[in-house]
Amino acid sequence: MRLLDRDGLRLAVDDVGSGEPPLVFVHPWSGDHAFFEPQVAHFSRRHRVVSVDLRGHGASDAPLGDYSMETFAGDLAWIVRTLELDRPVVVGHSMGGVIALALGALHPESVRALVLLDAPLLPSAPLLAAVPGLQQGMESPAYREVTRQFQGQFVGFADEPARRERILDVLVSGPQHVKASSLRHVFESDHAAWAASYRSPVLYVGSGGGFADLESLVKLCPQLQVSETSGSGHFHQLEVPDQVNAAIEHFLASLG
């Protein structure tokens, strides 16, 4: 991992491969760059691939403060400029997809296109109903146990219990102030405004879990393309990487 210094804030990035267009991978809530290992291994054979540890995650610094989607998007726009990436395709999973959409809407010069993997955009009523209790848990001394219980609903690999526990261990780790602030902003952000203002190509790859209101998203963002994986849960880029990679490949080919 390479550490970039943004006015005293160290942001960790993995920068491998070469080729156009460059790709930037943005991990989920409480994750890190390793949540895209299968994609980095696949796409770095023909593309420059940058995978990030968002501020507060992985090897990046975790200062006290507000962890809004706009703040994360600002960091990404700065990384794109600092690494001299020529309008990358930005791929975000879950919270990373919300951040990617914020980046495309607020810093359109920083992206060529977006790929949103199971991002909770205009989230479903059942998901929203679970948020207040989850948020309360993030602000309590039991935040790690609450994280494990919540994320355990969505991490697959039932036939690989050791791998499942390794993934959950990463999701449970990390500072409480980062988890609480970023979770709140995932659901309080104005997804609709960002979707309506974004104009470049975008692909949404769902897992079938109903994390987003895709019908409403298409009305706001008519260029949105939609595909779906099968046989996996929310972390489908790890569970069925071949399906996710194929969807991204097809989308990249459509960009010309």
Image (cartoon, helix red, strand yellow):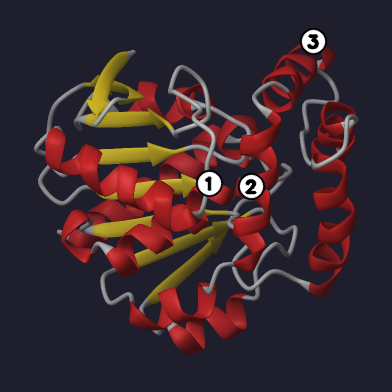
Q: CA distance from mark 2 to mark 1?
A: 5 Å
Q: Residue at x 24, y 24 (%)?
A: 5
Disc 3/disc 1 C-alpha distance (Å): 31 Å
**Badge 3 element:** helix
- Could you tell which of marks 2 and 3 lies nearer the N-terminus? 3
Whether residues under marks 2 and 1 lie with C-beta atoms below 8 angstroms apart, the answer is yes
**Residue 135 at least partly seen:** yes
Q: Which residue is mark 1?
A: 67
Residue mark closest to the camera, 2 vs 3: 2
Q: Is residue 116 visible from the viewing direction of this image?
A: no
Residue 156 on image: x %, y %: 78, 33
In the rendering, at what x and y percent does residue 61 appear? 44, 23
Instruction: Tell me which amino acid carries mark 1.
Output: Tyr
| Amino acid type, label 2 | Ser
Precedes in sequence: disc 3 or disc 1: 1
Q: CA distance from mark 2 to mark 3?
A: 30 Å
Q: Identify the residue position indicated by label 2 in the image.
A: 181
Per the image, the residue denoted by label 3 is: 162
N-term mark: 2 or 1: 1
Residue at (20% x, 55% y) in the render: 110
